[in-house]
Amino acid sequence: QVIDKNEIQFSKDMVNIMVPVLQDPKISGGSFLAVGQIVQIVHRNPEVNSYVVETLTPLLQNSGAEIRQAALTTMTDTVSIDNRIARNVVDLLIPLSKHSNKDIRHLALPNLQLLLKIHLRDETQFITDVVLKTFIPRLQDPDNDVRLAALDCIGELFPLLEDNDIHFLRNVTKAMIPLLKDSEKNVRKSTLTNIKKIMKSGNNSSQLEKDAIIQDFLPLLQDSDKDVRKTALEETREIMKFYESNIDAKFVVDVTEKFAPLLQDSDHQIRQLAASK
């Protein structure tokens, strides 16, 4: 038992030696070297994993982007060695998703999503709460990249949540719909794709207001950006095909007529897609 304590203390001492290396800009490749060494320390002695997380936590708010990334990479890599601390790291990242620094918010969201998807995938109620309380509020973030990250994170997590009830599905789609009018073209594209994912994968998605959602897609067929127009055409068709037995025939005809102007689109790929059956 004394030997075990000595080994743990030795491992902690080694971590303390590597943390300054991780932060030293004068050491070429120092952050990369430190990450590898700390992960190796945890691999040899998983009992120090919680100490590593505790020690590196302040660095997640460091002014240096490389240092923040190195600290978070170390944490996520060590979680892969010892899954017991996954929830601890998730609990650290949730408040960082609201940080005043947009770069920290943007760093937190995709890493939070990966931890949930890989290490906590069976905790569906917890993931549902994180989607509703952490990711959805970031859909209104003032930064384009953060909004885009939030959209994509929800889309990635949704297959784990497909058994949720219609109220959850409506809350998520209702939060996404306004982003179809976002000023950033990549946000508009991602919104189309991720709403389509929800409409196709949720076990209760057939109860969604399909006609209304498709109507919200249609203005993007005339979007100023060709990639958005193409995505709008593809996703609208895919939804209609998926639900063809549940959509009124007249509505299908009305929507299909909206595709007609795309036959004269300036982009040849869009013209070909509009002409295909």
Image: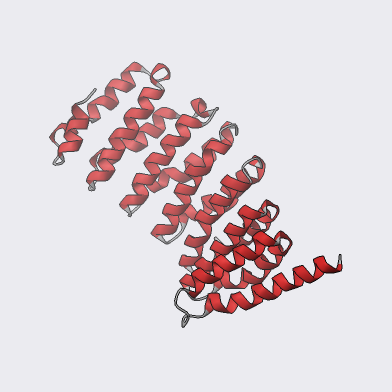
Q: Position of residue 7 (x, y in %)?
A: 76, 68
**Quick check: can you spot residue 200?**
yes
Query: For the point 50% across and 66% down, which residue is it?
Result: 69
Q: Taking 213 as reference, is 228 above or below it? A: below
Query: For the point 71% across and 62% down, which residue is it?
Result: 45
Task: Tell whether 31 sits left or right of 252.
Answer: right
Q: Taking 153 as reference, is 89 above or below it? A: below
Q: Position of residue 236 (x, y in %)?
A: 33, 32
Q: Position of residue 41 (x, y in %)?
A: 65, 65
Query: For the point 40% across and 28% down, which residue is it?
Result: 211
Q: Nearer the viewer, residue 43 or 179?
A: 43
Q: How many marks?
A: 0
**Quick check: can you spot residue 98?**
no
Q: Position of residue 99 (x, y in %)?
A: 54, 66
Farthest residue to the front: give it.
Answer: 3
Task: Tell whether 269 sits left or right of 152.
Answer: left
Q: Nearer the viewer, residue 98 or 119?
A: 119
Task: Tell whether 106 sits left or right of 258.
Answer: right
Query: For the point 31% across and 18% down, which residue is it?
Result: 250
Farthest residue to the bottom: give it.
Answer: 26
Farthest residue to the right: give it.
Answer: 1
Task: Tell whether 97 sits left or right of 103.
Answer: right
Quadrant, the C terminus: top left
